[in-house]
Amino acid sequence: MNRLVLNKPGLTLLILLIAAPFCGGVATADLLEEVAQQLVQRSSVWHDSVQVDFRARGVDWPPTGVLQDITPLSEKLRGTIVVDARLRDGSSLRLTAKVRTWDRLWSAACLIDGGETIFSDMITPRLVETTRLRQDILQLEESPVGMVARRRIQQRDLLAHTALEPPQAVKAGSEVRLRLQYGQVVLEDSGSALQGGGFGEQILVRSGSTGKVLQGNITPSGVVLCRIE
């Protein structure tokens, strides 16, 4: 088995030859390094660190040769991947790669109670193995600052999309300004919010002048726009 650990800056490789009879010289490391590099480059998701463990059946190990191209039999870059490697001498080699990935993700730097607004000092990046991690965890480029916790988040817990929600621009029971649009005619009114919501969301409100329950969208200014047909 050959193990290659790829680190994100410049795809630096640490190559360890483990429990395998050596029969290929330096070309072995070069071949497996090229296969690993191509696997990473073809992936649509970039990881902070990738570890690739190669195995092969029915061939001398470690394998040698000059790589021409590879065909991964899976689009994912995690778990077990079968790779067909074509060499320049016309031969081919089927490799099984066990891939582990690590990424820096947002985690709670302290206990966050449900309903709390998240500030920058309440979160911290943490390097974690993501090989089998569920998909709804926030990526590092998705800032949770300004979001509101739906439930209690323990210290060091990773932040998931399902645990956060946008801050409410309008709270249920609060007084709101209404803009009633009848075709080309627009009237101003006041009323009360029957539901809470964030900017752009649709909520129910009660008109202060007519007492009717209307449906409207919360605009960036905080006014609820109700289009009435």
Image: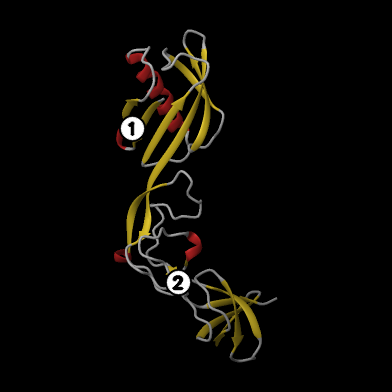
Query: What label sits on residue 11 in the rendered view?
Result: 1
Residue density around tag 1, few if under 14, some if 14–19, many if 20 or more, within 10 Å: some
The answer to which of marks 1 and 2 sits earlier in the sequence is 1
When asked about the image quadrant of residue 36, the answer is: top left
Distance from Cα at disc 1 to Cα at disc 2? 39 Å
Question: Which residue is label 2 attached to?
Answer: 167
Q: Nearer the viewer, residue 145 or 54?
A: 54
Colour approach in the figure: secondary structure
Q: Which amino acid is tagged 1?
A: Leu
Q: Residue at x 47, y 68 (%)?
A: 166
Counting labels gives 2
When asked about the image quadrant of residue 113, the answer is: bottom left
**SS state under label 1:** helix
Asked if residue 189 shows in the view, the reply is no
Asked if residue 200 shows in the view, the reply is yes
In the rendered image, residue 77, in percent from the top left (x then y), is placed at: 48, 36
Q: Residue at x 32, y 29 (%)?
A: 13
Figure quadrant of the C terminus: bottom right
Please tell me whether residue 58 is drawn above or below residue 72 in the rendered image.
above
When asked about the image quadrant of residue 48, the answer is: top left
In the rendered image, residue 148, in percent from the top left (x then y), is placed at: 43, 70
Q: Which amino acid is tagged 2?
A: Pro
Q: Residue furthest top?
A: 89
Please tell me whether residue 166 is drawn above or below residue 36 in the rendered image.
below
Query: What label sits on residue 34 in the rendered view?
Result: none
